[in-house]
Image (tube, rainbow, N blue to C red):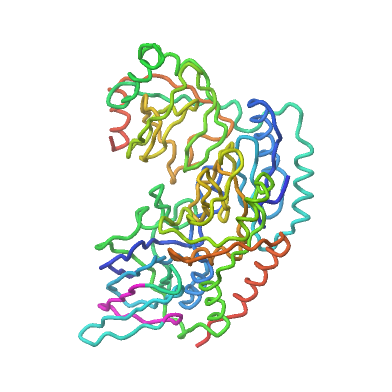
Amino acid sequence: MGFFRVLEPGLFTTVQDLGRAGCGAFAVPPGGVMDRISARLANSLVGNQPGASLLEMTLTGSSLHFEHDATIAFVGARAHAHIDGVGSRPRDLREGASITVRAGETVRIGALDHGCRVYLSIAGGLRVPNVLSSRSTLPGAGFGGHEGRSLRAGDRLEFDPAPPDAEASLGEHDWSLLREITTRRDIRAVPGAHATLFDDAAGRSFWDSPFSMSSHSDRVGLRLEGPRIVPPLGGRMASEGMMWGAVQVPADGQPIVLMADHPTTGGYPVIACVSTADLPVLGQLRPRDVIRFQQVTLEESRALYKARERRLESGVPRS
Amino acid sequence: MSWVGDRHLRVSVGEHAAEESRRLVLAATAAVHNGQIPSVVEVVPGYSTVLVTFDLAGLDARRVEGALHSALSNLPERVTPPGDGRLIEVPVCYEMPWSPDLVEVAGLHAMNTTEVVDLHCSVEYTVRFIGFSPGFPYLDGLPERLATPRLDRPRTRVPAGSVAIGGAQAGIYPRDSPGGWRLIGRTPLELFEPRRDPPSLLAAGDRVRFSPMSKDAFDRATAARGEN
């Protein structure tokens, strides 16, 4: 077993994996990593299963002091990162490649750009308890991950050290996929559960307008700022099941896109539902990024997902 | 029945009175669970809907539509869905400090606090579904005479287990959270414990009855759990 200690946690860092399934009826959302593409790439670089637990860092990364040897990688938003060695000069760390960390070294991941979140994987995965079949953190409910909360300075986490794999790095296919996830601003979506209740003007306004990401966005939902979309029924309806990707329109007319830790039911009318393939894109949006919604059919939306999965599978990290 | 996302299908039971909607939603939920529908990941009931979420990998949309049609077309006329008929007694301490709004609620309805407690405990509530946050029950059945508007300014912290009234709704807060409902008591029961199986104490279809407990009994119950 191995340990690292958190010197600086970064803005909001949590232990996540690919989340939970089948807990919606208890009002537990799926949760897990906000950008499944980057997380899966990070895990593959260190020889982990796609669902291994790792760290999700937001806008600014962590400084972690390793007490034991480890193989790590980080993928997602661009990160300025270096290692402080023991009695040696700091060396820059490259994103998208496996990295050997020696006992006594400190990995420092600084401010992120070209995206919102970066995933740091450790070969073997993080040893935190499995709660409701997942190691994901649900901070709003205070369970899962590391003590049900984001990391703080002084936290000490355990990992299962795995024998170092051959060195691996992302290939061109993976980089191109990653670029798309962090630069796309046309978000594909199908009409939502209550789309037909919105009047024509509201519909046109929604599909034709740019929206800016508010800084009041988080793992629960992205708040968008833009033209006021007038909701039907004063923006209140009887509660029904909600989903990751649902675009709700409350009375103030400013849409909210539900994300990984979403409330499982809600009473705001839903005008659209983002394509599953574009959920990782949403997970990489930064405050003040501007997006537009692009309507697609169900068939097109499912085809996007299939194409994305094929791209992910075709790009195998190579040494 | 319609797709509301590339992997989400919404079943609506239509416009009915509350009790009929409740029965139909429970029956539809059971039908989905028992219908051997491929690729199902989530089944989430609402007031008049059931949301079915699928795994997109390998999803055959036509096939699941067909399977759902079959499952839902055979809903029996009179149904006792699983969970219906399970009565959960929820002991509540209606004394201070756990009932900060009880006196005001009583005053607003020209009752005394004993009458409020008696009325709150006199009826059976039904759980329509668990929603919004882990373990949070949406309860029907609050006597009209107890309907009380929410606080103008929500509290920043409502303790877990608080028994509350929000407009015409009765509720119980599963965990510490901000809240604007009127707090009339507190239960030592844990509505949600992720390590328990099932993690939620209540489920759609359950019936709930509140009963008063003394402050001493409340303190003993929470001490036994190692917290206050």
Q: Position of residue A38 (x, y in %)?
A: 50, 71
Q: Left of B43 or right of it: where is B100?
A: left
Residue B196 quadrant: top left
Q: Position of residue B121 (x, y in %)?
A: 45, 17
Q: Position of residue B65 (x, y in %)?
A: 76, 50
Residue B5 quadrant: bottom right
Q: Nearer the viewer, residue A259 or B92?
A: A259
Where A77 sits versus B106, above or below? Answer: below
Magenta stretch contains residue A97: yes
Q: Nearer the viewer, residue B158 or A211?
A: A211
Q: Position of residue B8 (x, y in %)?
A: 65, 52
Q: Left of B86 or right of it: where is A106?
A: left
Magenta stretch contains residue B66: no
Q: Left of B164 or right of it: where is B75?
A: right
Q: Left of A202 or right of it: where is A79?
A: left
Q: How many marks?
A: 0
The residue located at (53%, 77%) in the rendering is: A179
The residue located at (27%, 67%) in the rendering is: A8
The residue range painted magenta reads A95-111
Give the quadrant of the N terminus of chain A. Answer: bottom left
Where A251 sits versus B57, above or below? Answer: above
Q: Nearer the viewer, residue A94 or A292?
A: A292
Where A102 sits versus A195, above or below? Answer: below
